[in-house]
Image (tube, coloured by chain):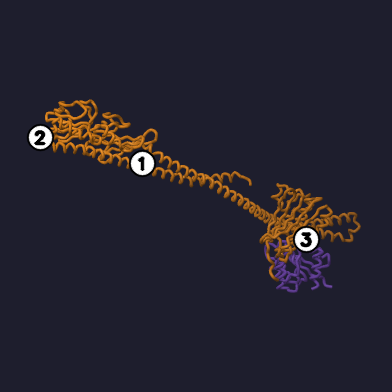
Amino acid sequence: MTKAPIYRSLRRRIVAITLVVSIAPLLTLGAVIYHQYIKVFEARIEDQIRHLARSQANAVDVFLNDRTTLLAVLVATRSFEELGDQRRLDALFDVITRSADGLGLVDLGVIAADGCQVAYAGPFALIGLDYSREAWFRETMSRGSHISDVFTGYRQLPHFIIAIRGHSVQGPWIMRATIDSQVFNRLVRSVRVGESGDAYIINPEGFLQTEARLAGQVLDRSALAPQRFGEEATVLRQPMGNGATRYVAGAWLKSKDWLLIVSQDSADQINSLYRTRDAEIIIILLGCLAIVIATVITTRTIVSRLQHADRDLNALNAQLLQRDKMAALGKMAAGIAHEINNPLAVIGEKAGWIRDLLDDPALQDSAVLPELMTSVDKIESHVERARKITHRMLGFARRMEPRLDDVDVNRVLGETVELLQNHARVNDIRIDLDLADDLPIIASDQSQLQQVFLNLLNNAIDAIGKDGVITGTTRRAGKEIHITITDNGPGIPPEHLARVFDPFFTTKDPGQGTGLGLAISFQIIEKMGGRLLLENVTPRGSRATVILPVVIPEPK
Amino acid sequence: MRQPTILVVDDEIDFLETIVNRLRKRGMAAEGVDNGREAIRRIVETPFDVVLLDIKMPGGMDGIEVLRQIKEQRPETEVILLTGHASVETSLEGMELGAFDYLLKPMRFEELLKKIAVALEK
C-alpha cells in the first residue's frame, strides 16, 4: 500500500487531535484531584495540630491550676505563724517531696508583708531574702494569686513560681512555690509531634518559657509573634525551603497569659502524600499510554480503510470517466460519420454515373477508356471502404439495444474458442478451458457476447504471437459470472493500461486493426450491465475479465 | 410497357441529380425535388410508382411527415426511405407508417435498383 503523504498527515492529525482531546481532560482531572487531595490532607494536618495544641494547653492549665489550688488550700487552712515556722514548713515540704514528682514543686517559701522570706524549704539558701521589689511580689499582693513568667532571680537559674496571698491578723502574707522546670518541660513536651515537631511556651512578649527542642532555650526570643495567635487555637503555615510546610499551632492558656506552641513539619506526613501522588501519576501515565496505543492503532486501521476505499473509489471513477469519454467520443464519431456519409454518397453516385456514361458506344474506341474504367472502379471501392468505416463508427456510437437470448456462457466461450482453434494451433498456441459447472443460464445477447469473446481471444493470440498458452475460465461469484481470458504473452505496458479501452487506440500497424475492438467490447459489456477489466498478471502476461450480472431469463 | 415513374426527394442537390440521371439512363421516368413541400405538391399533381424519400431533411417538412402525406394522398405509391445511419429508428417508424423498405446512405446503386424492382412488382 502506497503511503501517500496525504494519508500520513491525515493519520498524524487524527492522532494528535484525539490524544489532545482525551489526554487533556485526564491530566486536568488528575491535577484537580491531586490538588483537592492536598487541600484535604493539609486541612487534616491543621486540624490535628490545632487539636493537639488545644488539648495540650488544657493539660498545662490543669497542672497549673492543681498547684495553685494546692497552695490556696494550704494558705487558707494554715496560719502565717504555722507555715512561717521553719520546722513546720520543712515537715510539710517533706510530705510533698515524697509525692509523685514531688508534685512538681522545687521549693516552698513563706514571705511576710514586707517582702522578707521568713521560712523556706528547698534546695537553695534563700532564707531572709527580700522580695519586696520583685514584680511577682507586688502582683501577688495586689491580685491575691499569681503565676510568674520565667526569671532567673536570686538563684540564678531560670524558674517560675506560683504565689498565693494569705491573710493574717497582722496583715497579708505570701506563700510561694517554685515549679520544677524539668517536670513542667516534660509535661509541655509530652505532646506527640513526631521527629521534627516541637512544643514550648512563650509569653506575650515572645520569650520562651520552656526549653524547646528546636526553637531555642528558655528565655530566648522566639521567632514567633504571639499577636498572630487569636482566641481559638490558631494554626500558621510556614513554607519551608525543601517543599515541606511547618505547621505552628498556638493555644493561649487559661490560667496564665502564656501561649502554648506546637509545631510540626509536614515532612513526616508527606511520605504518605508522596506515595498517593506517585500512585496517581503512575495510573495517569498508564492511562495515557493506553490511550496513545489505542489511538494510534485505531487511527492506523481507519486510515488504511480510508485508503482502500479511496482506491476503490478511484477505480470506480476511472471506469466512469472511461464511460463518459467513450460516450463523448461516440457522439463526436456519430456526428462526424454522419456528416461524411453525405459527401460519400455523392461521390459514390457520381462515380457510378461516370461508369454509366462510359458505356456510351462513342467512347469504346478511346485509348484511355480502360484507365477511366479502372479509376472509376477504384473510386467506388474506396467509397465502399470509407462506407464500412463510417458504418462501423456509427455502430460503435449507437448500439442497438442488446437482444435477450437464453445464453449458456460456457457454450458461447467454447464455440468461440473452437472458431479460433486452427488459427491458434498454427501459431503453437494452446487454449485451455476451465469452466465452472454451476453457471446459470442468463438473459443476454448471444451474438454480442460472442463478439466480445472473439475480440478478447484474438487480442490474446496477437499478444502471444507464437508459442504460448491461453486460459479461459468461467466462475460464478454470487450474483455475477466471471469470465477470464489469460495469456502468457508480454503483458500490456503500464503506460498503455489506462488507454486500452480508448477508441482507435491500437499498438498494431496502421491497416492491421481499427483500434475499436476493445472499445466496442467495453461498450457491449457495459450495456449488459457488466464490467470489462484488463490487467497484467505475474509472472508474465495479461488477463481480461468479463463480469456479467446474473439475469435470469423471463419465462417465455 | 409503360416506363416506371420514380420521384426522388433529397435536399442534397448533387446526389439528387446523379440519382435521377442514373435512373433515367436505365429507362425510368425519374424526377427530382429537393424539399418535402414540393414533393407533396408534385405527387398530388401526378401519381408516381415509387418515391425515394430522404428522411433527414433539415428545414421545412420533416421526412416522416412527408411520408404520411404521401400515403394519405396516394396510398398506392410505394415509398423507399433513404437514411443516414443515425436515423435508423426513424426509418423503422417509417416502416410502421407504411414505407416499403429503407436503405442506408451511402448505398450501393445495385441494391437500390433491386428494391425498386420489387416495389414495382407490387
- Residues at marks 3 and 1, common chain? yes
In the drawing, does residue A156 fall left or right of residue A506? left
Tag nearer the camera, 1 or 2: 2
Q: Amino acid at mark 3?
A: Gly
Residue drawn 75% across and 48% down? A540
| x and y, in percent, of residue A261 in the image | 29, 36
In the drawing, does residue A376 fall left or right of residue A542? right
| x and y, in percent, of residue B43 in the image | 73, 70
Label annotation for residue A42: 1
- Residues at marks 1 and 2, common chain? yes
Q: Amino acid at mark 1?
A: Glu
Q: Quadrant of residue B50?
A: bottom right
Q: Which chain is purple?
A: B
Of the numbered discs 3 and 1, the one sitting upstream in the chain is 1
Label annotation for residue A414: 3
| x and y, in percent, of residue B121 in the image | 81, 72
Q: Chain of mark 2?
A: A
Q: Secondary structure at mark 2?
A: strand
Q: Amino acid at mark 2?
A: Ser
Mark 3 and mark 2: Cα distance apart in space: 148 Å
Q: Quadrant of the C terminus of chain A?
A: bottom right
Pointer 3: residues within 10 angstroms few (<14), some, or many (20+)?
A: some
In the drawing, does residue A170 fall left or right of residue A3? left
Label annotation for residue A168: 2
Q: Secondary structure at mark 3?
A: helix
